[in-house]
């Protein structure tokens, strides 16, 4: 049977976000596109199990995540060498935030445990609710919340070290305040 | 040492406190001040984390749907039974 065009459009509308999520998991645009393609093949083959009116993005994200976990995890060592290719995906260089700062951020993000990074992306970038993110990851809402919190804290720690080094005044202010006490 | 004790009667009362102070001060001075800085720094960084996270993500989102994906979805959605 043919696919309802409305459903098809919902699928297509989710693809850009699905790719962004896939890249955040794989760290590599080619693998991410393979993963997205596999996800769509699987989703369309089982489109009957999607209930119209429910959350299409959450459904597709769940399929993609499960595929990634089951297949791509086995190739972890390859997946880890994400760095070089990722830059290629950034066609519009985000100048507004600064290239160096952006690279620092990416480096910090890559140092997070994958479950924390995933939770942070789903909630902080994809815009899913904690409940949806929990469903996608197959865990409790509280688990997602704590992963997101830990991810933010860890990122802040990693980035704060750079900030203190970067901004001389902060260091000077500390020294003055510390000195003023004595 | 002893001359101090006799000379400073008022400080003598403060002496026990003073004996504690050097340590307490260090403890206070070095933990309290950085804490304030860290809280402020922490907020700035949380805002920045949010912005950069979305900037990174949206950079990919804004690339839209690659042609081969559009073709794939259209092809599959037109199939009569191939998808099963």
Image (cartoon, coloured by chain):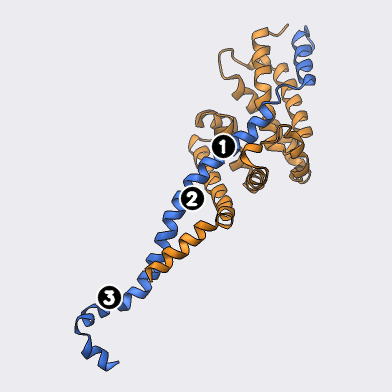
Chain colours: A orange, B blue
Residue A144 at what x, y percent from top left?
A: 53, 38
Mark before the other along the chain sequence, 2 or 3: 3
Q: Is residue B17 shown above or below A120?
A: below
Q: Which residue is mark 3?
A: B17
Q: Which residue is mark 1?
A: B51
Give the quadrant of the C terminus of chain A.
bottom left
Q: Is residue A124 left or right of residue B32?
A: right
Q: Secondary structure at mark 1?
A: helix
Chain under callout 3: B
**What is the quadrant of residue B70 in the picture?**
top right
Chain under callout 1: B
Q: How many marks?
A: 3
Q: Secondary structure at mark 3?
A: helix
Residue at far left of view: B9
**What is the quadrant of residue A50 in the picture?**
top right
Q: Is residue A151 left or right of residue A7?
A: left
Q: Is residue A62 shown above or below B11?
A: above
Q: Which residue is mark 2?
A: B41
Mark 3 neighbour class, 10 Å CA radius: few under 14, some 14 to 19, many 20 or more:
few
Say yes or no: labels 1 and 2 on the same chain.
yes
Q: Nearer the viewer, residue B80 or A91?
A: A91
Q: Nearer the viewer, residue A79 or A168?
A: A168
* Residue occupying image coordinates x 48% and y 48%: B42
Mark 1 neighbour class, 10 Å CA radius: few under 14, some 14 to 19, many 20 or more:
some
Mark before the other along the chain sequence, 1 or 2: 2
Tell me the CA gap for discs 1 and 2: 15 Å
Q: Is residue A2 left or right of residue B43?
A: right
């Amino acid at each position: 049977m043919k696919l309802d065009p409305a459903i098809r459009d919902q699928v297509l509308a989710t693809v850009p976000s699905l790719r962004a999520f896939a890249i955040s998991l794989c760290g590599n645009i080619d693998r991410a596109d393979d993963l997205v393609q596999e996800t769509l093949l699987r989703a369309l083959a089982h489109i009957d199990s999607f209930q119209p009116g429910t959350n299409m993005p959450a459904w597709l994200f769940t399929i993609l995540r499960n595929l990634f976990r089951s297949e791509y995890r086995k190739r972890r060592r390859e997946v880890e060498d994400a760095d070089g290719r990722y830059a290629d995906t950034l066609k519009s260089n985000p100048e507004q935030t600064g290239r160096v700062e952006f690279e620092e951020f990416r480096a910090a993000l890559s140092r997070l445990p994958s479950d924390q990074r995933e939770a942070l992306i789903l909630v902080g970038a994809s815009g899913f609710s904690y409940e949806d993110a929990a469903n996608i990851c197959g865990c409790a809402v509280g688990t997602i919340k704590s992963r997101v919190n830990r991810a933010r804290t860890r990122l802040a720690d990693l980035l704060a070290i750079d900030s203190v080094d970067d901004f001389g005044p902060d260091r000077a202010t500390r020294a003055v305040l510390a000195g003023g006490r004595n | 040492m002893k001359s101090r004790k006799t000379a400073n009667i008022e400080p003598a009362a403060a002496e026990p406190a003073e004996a504690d102070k050097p340590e307490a001060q260090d403890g206070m001075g070095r933990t309290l001040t950085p804490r304030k800085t860290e809280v402020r720094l922490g907020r700035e960084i949380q805002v920045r984390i949010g912005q950069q996270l979305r900037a990174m993500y949206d950079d990919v989102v804004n690339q839209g749907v690659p042609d081969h994906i559009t073709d794939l979805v259209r092809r599959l959605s037109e199939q009569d039974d191939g998808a099963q």
